[in-house]
Image (cartoon, helix red, strand yellow):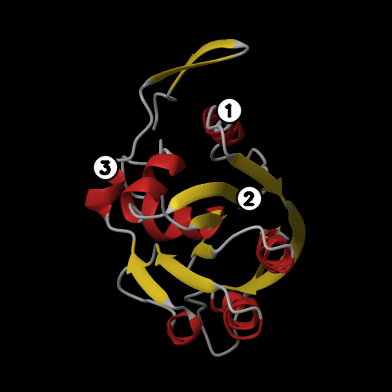
Amino acid sequence: MGLKTNVYIDAFNLYYGALRKTPYRWLDLAKLCQFMLPKNTIHQIKYFTALVKPRPSNRSKPVRQQIYLRALKTLPNIEIVLGHYLSHPVSMPLADSPGKKPQYVRVIKTEEKGSDVNLATHLLSDAYENNYDIAVIISNDSDLAAPIKIVANRLKKVVGVLNPHGRYPSQELMKHANFFKTVREGILSKCQFPHTLTDEHGTFHKPDIW
């Protein structure tokens, strides 16, 4: 039996780094963890995300996300931790403004807030409570280097990183992690949910667009 391992997933970093332009978004996170950490005992998977809002160009996106979160909830050892989105109008310069003075337009800027802080908090809290032997972070966000350093150096836990941004690994994360692996497309293809799933509410399917 392998060492007790918790996996902490930065959902948006995983999505934009490895999933967005692939047909593999129907990702079974338990299979992914087992495939990439075959000698570990996966104790808990924590998935840090925020609920997306409908946009004029993509009104069905929240529905697809809810179906995926429903799929994740069929896994026995997962916890979904929600942050939030913050939208506000800002002035941004046009990329190709004519003349010497840049022209500005008003746009709605949407930012995901809380996931990185929530992930760092859970990583540290679980370490202090001796909730794992090994922590694995799925992210390439260099902001997580400080909590990884504390957990590895002060709390003497093994910390690994599974990097979803294959070509551009964070040097800060590599510096402080005990081990570092890349999430590759070939692995994602082998770690998909079945097209049809069943939970306590009934049967549901992978979204058609996915």
Q: Dot 2 corresponds to which residue?
A: 49
**Residue 168 locus on image (x, y percent):** 36, 76
Q: Work out whether mark 1 precedes mark 2 in sequence or the reverse, and give the earlier one.
A: 2
Which disc, if any, is residue 119? Answer: none
The residue located at (49%, 75%) in the rendering is 95
| Secondary structure state at the residue bearing disc 2 | strand
In this view, the residue in front, 208 or 102, is 208
| Amino acid at the residue labelled 1 | Arg
Residue 32, how many percent across, how many down?
Answer: 38, 47
Kind of residue at disc 3: Ser
Q: Nearer the viewer, residue 143 or 102?
A: 143
Residue 77 visible in the shown view = yes
- Residue 118 at x, y = what percent? 72, 60
Chain-order first, disc 2 or disc 3: 2
In the displayed structure, would residue 174 be above or below residue 109?
Answer: below
- Residue that sits furthest to the top in the current view: 202
Tell me which residue sits at (31%, 40%) in the image. Answer: 23
Counting other residues with Cα less than 10 Å from the Cα at mark 3, is it few (<14), some (14-19), or many (20 or more)?
some
Q: Is residue 113 visible?
A: no
Q: Which residue is mark 1?
A: 70
| Alpha carbon distance from label 1 to label 3 | 20 Å
- Callout 2 environment at 10 Å: few (<14), some (14 to 19), or many (20+)? many
CA separation, marks 2 and 3?
22 Å
> Label 1 neighbourhood size at 10 Å, few (<14), some (14-19), many (20+)?
some
Give the mark nearest the N terminus, 1 or 3.
Answer: 1
Q: Which residue is mark 3?
A: 189
Residue 27: % across, % down: 41, 40
Helix or strand or loop: what does disc 3 sit on? helix
